[in-house]
Each structure stands twice: as structure tokens, then as C-alpha cells.
């Protein structure tokens, strides 16, 4: 969504801006199954970390050497996939997980990433595409935190 600022000037909403960053970050992903980007913001709306999915640093990329899970449907054969998730990579960049206010991800977090995020101060998960399993959403909401899918988001 674009906010009219004055005259012909417009400005992206904070949600659209942050999600656009997540979409661009996803373009760095090295997983063949799916490209996912994550952007973590503090309570002032400042970016404190970004992440994308791919193999651990120093290992061959799935783009070059596909893992055994490359053809598996989304949400299946997770143990066969060698990639770290975008949320995991972003959390590894955080100097202090108690400064996290929200995370913007191109795909809602899996159950494991949701559990990791629950052990931070993150209060809000914002995403574009819903992950196939609902257990992560149920767990997050049961903790009284916000789970939001962006619709009509202007992203790159």
C-alpha cells in the first residue's frame, strides 16, 4: 500500500517497505526448492538483521549440488534439506535477540523457526505466503503474539 504524503508524493507503508526488503533478500537464496527472505526490525522500525535460506557457510550451494530434498513438496522431507532457513540465518546475525520487535518473511515460519522466534522478544510475524502446516501459527498465536499475512503488498 502507498500512502499519499502531499501533492504527487507517495511513500510506502512500513509493512510494504520491510516486506520489499525481505523479497529482495530472498533473491540471495541458494536453495532450489524455494527462495525465502527474512528481515528483522526493532521497535523503532530499524533493520537489525536479514537472512535468506541456503546451506551453511562454506558448504556447496544447492544451486550447484542439489540436496536429496530438492524435489520434495514444500513442508516435506525437511531433514533431507541441507539449507538453513531465512529466519535462522537472520537470528544468527542478531547481536541481541531481546531487541527484536517484528520479522518480515516471504513465507510464514515453520514450526522450528517459530519456536526459535518465541525465545526472543519478537511480537509480530508478517509474511506473504502461508506455510503448508498450521502448527507454527497455532503455537505463535497461543503465546499471544501477532501472526499477519500481508495482502496487496507492493513489493519488488
Image (tube, rainbow, N blue to C red):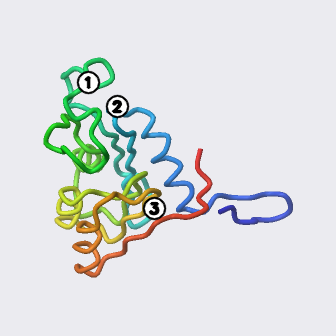
Label 1 or label 3, whichever lies nearer to me, is 1
Mark 2 is surrounded, within 10 Å at the Cα level, by few (under 14), some (14 to 19) or many (20 or more) other residues, namely some
Looking at the rendering, which quadrant does residue 143 occupy?
A: bottom left
Along the horizontal axis of the image, is 153 left or right of 97?
Answer: right
Along the horizontal axis of the image, is 63 left or right of 120?
Answer: right
Badge 1 or badge 2: first in the primary sequence: 2
Q: Nearer the viewer, residue 31 or 6?
A: 31
Q: In this view, does 61 lie above or below 97?
A: above
Q: Which mark is residue 45?
A: 3
Label 2 or label 3, whichever lies nearer to me, is 2
Looking at the rendering, which quadrant does residue 114 occupy?
A: bottom left
Q: Which of 140 and 44 is in front in this view?
A: 140
Helix, strand, or loop for circle 2?
Answer: loop
Q: Which residue is drawn at 21% across and 28% down?
A: 67
Q: Are marks 2 and 3 in contact (CB under 8 Å)?
A: no
Q: Do the residues labelled 1 and 2 touch (CB within 8 Å)?
A: yes
Q: Distance between the residues labelled 2 and 3?
A: 31 Å
Q: In which quarter of the image is the C terminus?
A: top right
Q: Which residue is drawn at 23% across and 48% down?
A: 76
Q: Is residue 23 above or below residue 69?
A: below
Give the residue pinned by disc 2. Answer: 32
Q: Residue at x 23, y 31 (%)?
A: 55
Q: Is residue 141 above or below residue 149?
A: below
Q: Residue at x 53, y 49 (%)?
A: 20
Badge 2 or badge 3: first in the primary sequence: 2
Helix, strand, or loop for circle 3?
Answer: loop
Give the residue pinned by disc 1. Answer: 66
Amino acid at each position: 500500500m502507498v500512502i499519499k504524503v502531499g501533492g504527487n508524493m507517495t511513500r510506502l507503508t512500513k509493512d510494504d517497505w520491510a516486506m520489499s526488503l525481505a523479497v529482495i533478500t530472498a533473491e540471495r537464496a541458494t536453495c532450489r526448492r524455494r527462495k525465502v527472505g527474512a528481515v528483522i526490525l526493532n521497535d523503532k522500525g530499524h533493520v537489525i538483521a536479514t537472512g535468506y535460506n541456503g546451506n551453511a557457510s562454506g558448504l556447496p550451494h544447492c544451486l550447484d549440488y542439489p540436496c536429496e530434498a530438492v524435489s520434495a513438496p514444500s513442508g516435506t522431507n525437511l531433514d533431507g534439506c541441507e539449507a538453513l532457513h531465512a529466519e535462522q540465518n537472520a537470528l544468527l546475525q542478531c547481536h541481541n535477540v531481546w531487541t527484536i520487535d517484528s520479522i518480515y518473511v516471504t513465507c510464514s515460519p515453520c514450526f522450528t523457526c517459530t519456536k526459535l522466534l518465541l525465545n526472543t522478544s519478537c511480537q509480530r510475524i508478517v509474511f506473504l505466503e502461508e506455510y503448508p502446516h498450521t502448527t507454527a501459527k497455532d503455537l505463535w498465536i497461543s503465546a499471544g503474539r501477532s501472526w499477519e499475512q500481508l495482502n496487496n503488498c507492493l513489493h519488488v
